[in-house]
Amino acid sequence: MAAPKRIKLNVDGKPYSVTADPEMPLLYALRNDIGLDNPHFGCGLAQCGACTVHVDGAATRSCSFTVGQAEGKKVVTLAGLGTPEKPHPLQKAYVDEQVPQCGYCVNGWIMTAAELLKKNPKADDKQIREGLAGLKCRCGTHMSIIRAVKRAAKEMAS
Amino acid sequence: MTKMISIEDFAFSRRKLLQGAGALVVSAAAPAVAAKKARAATAAFGSAVKPALKPDQLDSFIAITADGKVTAFFGKMDMGQGVDVAISQIVAEELDVKYERVTSILGDTQTSVNQGGASGSTAVQNGGKAMRAIAAEARRVLVEEAAKRLGASVGDLVVDDGVVSVKGNAAKKISYADILQGRYFNHKLKWNKRYGNGLYSEGKAKPKKPSEYKVVGQSFPRTDIPGKVYGTSPMITDVRVPGMVHGRVIHPEKAGGMPKAFDASSIKHIKGARVVHEKGFIGVVANTEWDAVRASQELKVTWSDGGNPFGDQKNLYDHIRKAKVIAKKHDTKEGDVAAALKGAAKVIEAEYEWPFQSHASMGPACAIVDANPKNAVVWTGSQKPHYTAEGVAAILKIKADDVRGIWVPGPGSYGRNDAGDAAAQAALLSKAVGKPVRVQGMRHEGTAWDPKSPASIHRCRGGLDANGNVVAFEFMSKGFDRQDVRSNESKPQDNLAGQQIGAKLRPAKTFRSPEDMYNVGARLIGWEVIPPFIPRYSPLRTSHLRDPLGPQIQFASEQFHDEMAEVAGMDPAAYRLKYLKDPRDRDLVKAAVEKSGWKERVGPRKDQGGKTTVSGRGISYAYRNGTRVVVIAEVEVDKTTGRVWPRKFTVAHDCGLIINPEALKLCLEGNIVMAASRSLYEEVMFDADRVTSVDWATYPILETPDAPEVIDCVLLNRPDKPATGAGEAATRPVSGAIANAVYDATGRRLRRGPVTAERVKALVS
Ligand code: FES
Ligand code: FES
């Protein structure tokens, strides 16, 4: 472990400064130092996506990305993506399609799908399924997830 | 509660809990207001003081506040399938108030009685039934009181959205809120003296006839979804209380080991980190989560050698076959199977095998416990917080009434996952350090160390007469205990920490049989249970996983019925129509067949020679505690890779009266996908001395590229039949449907689950 140091972060458009071991996963800084709880700990191994945030626009698994690496970059969490007042189309579609069961996976899917649709707004069924591979949902809500992503894509196109 | 621990003492406040507390606070604050009004209206109804939280009191289940809002307090949990919505619908229906007026508060031992938590898909079946009777009773006493106030007879009154008025004279009216004036009913119910799933309380009122329903049967949206989608509702993992520190526990690399010694200096460099060691339990506590994680990884522990308790996984089924039997039972004994088999023109036999499977919840379990010498609070994601609180009390050796359990939604649990273990671990750690401790497991604790669904074998024998009629059916399961640890976490021996510190064990020694509705001649159906590999502190201890034992049993029984159908020269759907006698079952088969466009055929498809990708269809039927399901799976099999894609499912489902059709459909989809995942990919792997399925790479589950294209649901509503469970039943027939479809596609039968690409490839080459 490295000695703790002050690290400046920009999260959801706001500046933060945390004192932490630079080797600590960004996830813990977001959750425990900044109090942004939407990225979840699912595996700590970059295998499930529950901890996903955007780092300079790229969907990044914050359990396997250190707080030191995040310094000087723009981090966006689910709360920064959209709010009940100004929802991201994916969030709206998720509510319309009544997607989540337990909801522990939701963060990972929405953050990853947001990047997918940004890169490929016209993603078809196959591209959506492949683009979201690697994400886990133990409750098995995959059918409604796929419906919601398609619904959001449609809305974003119109 | 002898010791009240106020939620206001804690910085953490859950929105829903606050609403709940709000209802209580309003009620608790009500006496002063109510007292004034009582002087004005001498006939004030109810009581200013809340009666004790017991199942024989109406106030334990329903509150109506002065603003006319209705709160239902429910002792079962929602695992993201809309249980609270269904309960609010039922309560609104019986009370004759708008659905929007009702909020259901779930899972705080201080606001609800123990109705069993999430258990066996009984939220609506049992819990809903009780709430229906109780809400009807609430309406009855309110209307009776209204009659007195209005000087009318009960028969002349009507209720519209909580306002009681005289028929034909709408001006003569009084609302529930005005009757109660923020007071409590103080009305006794007839309680059956049971806690848990069996709890039932009722009054004199008769609930409505289903033909009168206006709210039940409608698809109201879930209340929890926006909070989950915008990330505005805290989950169990987000609970923080003042003074809280972080704990992690340490398990041996090799199963069966116990901590012999540890080197505290190995974590000296982590400021504030300390070791908690009690008999076989060892954990660390640190000021920050990351420090706790590091301390748990860096602490040097010497473990005793557990030997090679599991043996070679290749021998698992042989082990089961040869293992001594510690309990056995015949659940069905009809006619003389031995004689029927002897006299049969044809006898067929088959044996099926199913591995250990893991709950592998999306997040490893989390709990926060604030243990004081005489009382404690536990925040838990467990689906049975009342039992969890009892378990925490037992491990802390304090009275159950002195522990408050607060359920906060977390990763789905699907039965007895690792949630109860986390609570007991946090309790031991909190007691040791005298501070509230938050424990969240690491991935291996959710996959390698959760209680497993038991591995088993299933032996089938069937006899057919000269005309191809089935005259005998024998089905014997042999496997690990259905509940080596009980799914209720109310005793220390039922969780890991309790086992580590030496609690006396109490395995249930049970299994399950197919709840068979097939009318297939003489029948002998039963099971045998074998001892666990390690009796205590085992990563292969067994307990409930969604639809306990359903997938393994139906993998065997539904394939075997297909095997018999083929020998009898029958189409599998026609076979089911012939041997299922209950019209509800037959209607389901017909509905699924029609919806999927099933074509009659005997034996597997024979028209796909030479193709690399072949397709097939398979049907499967299941009965589960009143609910019936028929699933038709259509699969594509790539013969070069062995990949099976479950392209389409048609699900015909009958759970009696449907409360909320849209929520039911989504619930069924989740069941089908999770069951498909278990049928195709999931197998807990182990070496002789350890479980090697430790994460998502070593315990893969279904992902989007393999998700079905379509799941078609046909919901057969039976308003005249009691509402039965829907949370698990559709899980049951999926393994059999997929295996039958793979047979149809390839002409080869796979009798060992799951139906992995590797096995299918070996099967077809
Ligand atoms: S927690 Fe980061 S990918 Fe699973
Ligand atoms: S909704 Fe529970 S894990 Fe996806």
Image (cartoon, rainbow, N blue to C red):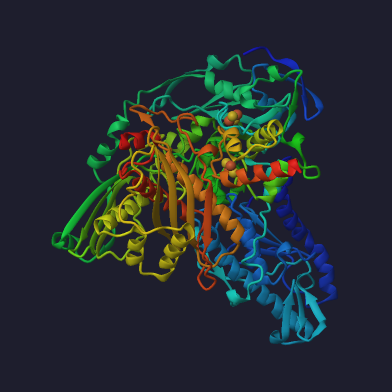
**Seen in the image, is B382 located left or right of residue B349?**
right
Q: Position of residue A63 (x, y in %)?
A: 62, 26
- Whether residue B75 is visible here, answered yes or no, is no
Along the line of sight, the residue nearer the viewer: B70 or B686: B686
**Seen in the image, is B254 located left or right of residue A111?**
left
Q: Residue furthest top?
A: A3
Quadrant of res B762: top left
Along the line of sight, the residue nearer the viewer: B330 or B245: B330
Q: Is residue B269 above or below residue B663?
A: above
Q: Is residue B738 above or below residue B370?
A: below
Along the line of sight, the residue nearer the viewer: B43 or A57: A57
Along the line of sight, the residue nearer the viewer: B653 or B367: B653
- Whether residue A138 is visible here, answered yes or no, is yes
For image coordinates 48% across by 29% down, the residue present is B697
Q: Position of residue B640 (x, y in %)?
A: 38, 32
Q: Position of residue A21 (x, y in %)?
A: 67, 17
| Quarter of the rendering occupied by the C terminus of chain B | top left
Quadrant hosting ligand 2: top right
| Quarter of the rendering occupied by the N terminus of chain B | bottom right
For image coordinates 25% across by 37% down, the residue present is B318
Quadrant of res B523: bottom left
For image coordinates 36% across by 40% down, the residue present is B355
